[in-house]
Image (cartoon, rainbow, N blue to C red):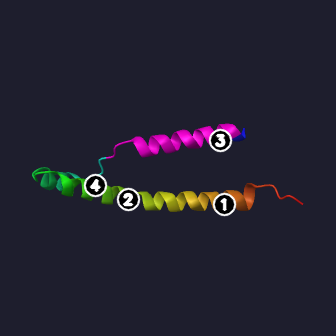
Amino acid sequence: MFKIKHKILFNLLVIFFTIRINAQCAMCRAVLESEEGQSTAEGINDGIVYLMSVPYILIAGIGVLIYFKFFRTKKS
């Protein structure tokens, strides 16, 4: 059971870090597509993805804390 959890977690992390995400809104995309080089558009997109990931990381951390607080058996 323990190895299965590690495999699932590893697969989710691989999928999470290999998916190319385009998180720009329509207005930002229209303005930034007209620029030469697209370096600003890539920077804006990375910033949006970074800001979007923080709440998910916090919720996951709270979930882990709840799991360890209530569902782990105490060794005594």
Q: Amino acid at mark 4?
A: Asn
Stretch of the chain drawn in magenta? 3-21
Is 9 left, or right, of 2 in this rendering? Answer: left
Q: Work out whether mark 4 precedes mark 1 in sequence or the reverse, and give the earlier one.
A: 4
Q: CA distance from mark 4 to mark 3?
A: 32 Å
Q: CA distance from mark 3 to mark 1?
A: 18 Å
Disc 2 target residue:
50
Q: Nearer the viewer, mark 3 or mark 1?
A: 3
Residue at the far right in the pictured view: 76
Q: Amino acid at mark 2?
A: Tyr
Q: Work out whether mark 2 precedes mark 1 in sequence or the reverse, and give the earlier one.
A: 2
Q: Residue at 34% of width from left, 43% of height from top? A: 20
Q: Amino acid at mark 1?
A: Ile
Q: CA distance from mark 4 to mark 1?
A: 33 Å
Q: Work out whether mark 4 precedes mark 3 in sequence or the reverse, and give the earlier one.
A: 3
Residue 45, percent from left and from top? 28, 54
Q: Which is the main secondary structure of the residues drawn in magenta?
A: helix
Disc 1 target residue:
66
Using a 10 Å C-alpha cutoff, classify the residue at mark 4 as few (fewer than 14 neighbours), some (14 to 19) or many (20 or more).
some
Q: Is residue 18 magenta?
A: yes
Using a 10 Å C-alpha cutoff, classify the residue at mark 2 as few (fewer than 14 neighbours), some (14 to 19) or many (20 or more).
few
Is 43 left, or right, of 66 in this rendering? Answer: left
User: Disc 1 on helix, strand or loop?
Assistant: helix
